[in-house]
Image (cartoon, helix red, strand yellow):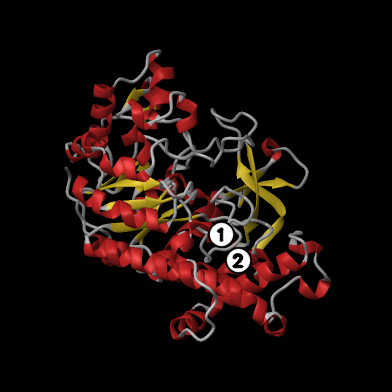
Amino acid sequence: MSAFTPPPMSQDLWHKIGVQQHHGVNIFLPSLKRRNSLQGDILSLKMLLPWLKKTGFDVIQLLPINDSGTDISPYNIVSAHALNPGLLPPESLKPLDKEDPDFKKFQQTSAYWLRPYCLFKVLKEKNSQKAFWEWPQEEQGYNDLLYLEYQEKALAYAYTQYLLHKEMKELQEEASSLHIKLMGDLPILVSPDSAEVWQHPALFDKRYDAGAPPDYYEQEGQCWGFPLHRFEAMQEDNFTWWKERLKTASFYYNLYRIDHVVGLFRLWAIPKGKKAKEGFFIPSEQSVWLPQGQIFLKALLEDSPLLPIAEDLGVIPPEVRSTLTEDGIPGTKVPRWERYWDQGGAFISLKDYPVCSLTTVSTHDSQTLQEWWSKENNRPLDQATRFELLRESHQSSSLFHINLLGEYLALFKELVYNEDTLERINIPGHLNNTNWRYRTKPFLEEILEHKELLRLMQKMI
């Protein structure tokens, strides 16, 4: 493996993580069900830690665990700070204690986001869950007087966040004692009906919906329904909104994934009422979007103790990847897509991946390894070949090697569903009855007790 010397921009962040091989599992937390709970929660992660330590892995990557309101998609967040109340273990529920000194301290240190979020939730309930632009005029934005009016009702939401905060801090401490790193996920976009847009309307452009242009996989393009960033407004505010959410993330994580990193450079903007393919890039000129992305990334690196890892999949301008390399930000490598496309499509050797990268055999948005292999080779993926492909992903020249938990479970037929599509987490750009409803076939306890699974995972690194 080639040596890697982090550039000055991210040198300190790298040294906190360790410039060495890191191996991990990627978890969609609700899928990690326990015998007495049909949805995974933070306690599920605590139970997973000793098992992960035995595998020799040292990273848990989490898909977003922010509050996403009534949407089960963890990327349609209503808060860039608040955690999903559904992830609080039932065992940790407690009645509101206003006098708890730790709760009072949490309210003080988190006031920059907690007050607006809790007021937003109270007003949502008061207005029968309608979008905030349908609320009375005097409620269509945050102010301290409005908060004081509803402070008592807001306390219940604040206490839930306090209990979640306690659970996550305990998780981080237990992980740290085992030398396991926690990797969060920061969606760069937020729901149009969110506490973020409600509190900071000047930072978001609601004239357009963000999405993706037509490509090989989606010929009609994709419309996600998120408002765009107003880069100039964020820059004028010294990127405070970003810095504050990174501050919150630093309480729980050691590093984080930047979702759709190209969106910091330019976003596919779809005028309201138009089809996705009728959109256009904002900014459209490279002379504008390239320095914009560079300024964005510089701000994120300078004001956070966390190393970012970029999701740079799909059609990405080479200048974006060059910027990531210059800043020492690892990109993401999925072997099935890493090919010499201009030379007949031959696969790039995993030994030739950039050292500053993360290798993964699939993502939550892609077909599983089984689905892709069966289609590509017109035959199912047997255990020996699956093991070899997973092992190779852990032996690539990347410094990070992280795969979805389900890809390891699929080494054993009894640990996965008979129908391959049931193992897929999400099909982006599509509304259906399966997206984000994935739960592992076995209970967590069964995974932890499966000795052969542990043995094979230990052999991968």
Location of mark 1 (residue): 67
Total number of numbered labels?
A: 2
The residue nearer to you, when weighing 403 against 353, is 403
Residue 304 appears at what percent x and percent y?
A: 39, 69
Image quarter of residue 337: top left
* Image x and y of residue 402, in percent: 31, 44
- The amino acid beneath tag 2 is Glu
Please, what secondary structure does the residue beneath circle 2 have?
Answer: helix
Q: Quadrant of residue 142?
A: bottom right
Name the residue carrying label 2: 232
Residue 19 visible to the viewer: yes
Give the answer, above or below, for where 296 lies relative to 74. Answer: below
* Placement of 279 over or under 345, stated as above or below: below
Q: What amino acid type should be assigned to the residue bearing mark 1?
A: Asp
Q: Quadrant of residue 404?
A: top left
Position in image of residue 77 (x %, y %): 58, 56
Left or right relative to 253: residue 58: left
Give the quarter of the figure containing the C terminus. Answer: top left
Quadrant for the N terminus, please. top left
Circle nearer the viewer, 1 or 2: 1
Vertical comparison of 459 with 89: above or below? above
Q: Secondary structure at mark 1?
A: loop
Residue occupying image coordinates x 21% and y 45%: 55
